[in-house]
Image (cartoon, grey):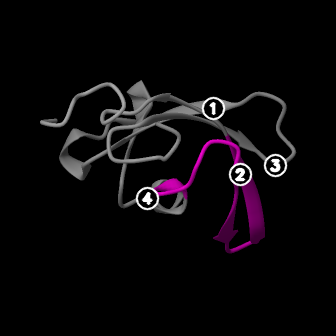
Amino acid sequence: DDVVTMRSKVRVRIENHQKPVEYTIEYPQDANPDEGSISILTPLATAVLGERSGDEVPWSLAAGVRRYKIDSILYQPEAAGHFDQ
């Protein structure tokens, strides 16, 4: 229940930002950034997939490396018993 998987909702804190952001990791056809769901194909989603709550994840950008901390996993399908989604 502390590993980011597909359809997990995570709270992530971006380095040098006060307020955390929340994202749900979705398949590309189900992603809707306006509603807080991002495609697994985005760099942020691929960076956090398989990581654990509390992990710090480096993310390479054109301007350099930015760090993200996974504050918490708010929902994880497997932990909730939702294996068919």
SS for tag 4? Answer: loop
> In the rendered structure, which amino acid carries the disc numbered 4?
Thr
Give the distance between the C-alpha atoms of the residues marked 3 and 2, in whole angstroms.
6 Å
Residue 11, position as x, y percentages in the image: 60, 32
> In the rendered structure, which amino acid carries the disc numbered 1?
Val
Q: Disc 2 marks which residue? A: 68
User: Seen in the image, is 82 located left or right of residue 22?
Assistant: left
**Which badge, 4 or 3, is on the more N-terminal residue?**
3
Q: Which mark is residue 42?
A: 4
Q: Disc 1 marks which residue? A: 21
Give the distance between the C-alpha atoms of the residues marked 4 and 3, in whole angstroms.
18 Å
SS for tag 1? Answer: strand
Query: Where the C terminus falls, by quadrant?
Result: top left
Judge whether residue 69 is colored magenta: yes
Give the distance between the C-alpha atoms of the residues marked 2 and 1, in whole angstroms.
10 Å
Contact between labelled residues 2 and 3, with CB atoms less than 8 Å apart: yes
**Which badge, 4 or 1, is on the more N-terminal residue?**
1
SS for tag 2? Answer: strand
User: Seen in the image, is 48 located left or right of residue 72?
Assistant: left
User: Seen in the image, is 42 located left or right of residue 15?
Assistant: left
Judge whether residue 32 is colored magenta: no
SS for tag 3? Answer: loop
Q: Which mark is residue 15?
A: 3
Residue shown at 46% from the left, 36% from the top:
1
Q: Which mark is residue 51?
A: none
Please tell me whether residue 25 is drawn above or below residue 49 in the rendered image. Answer: above
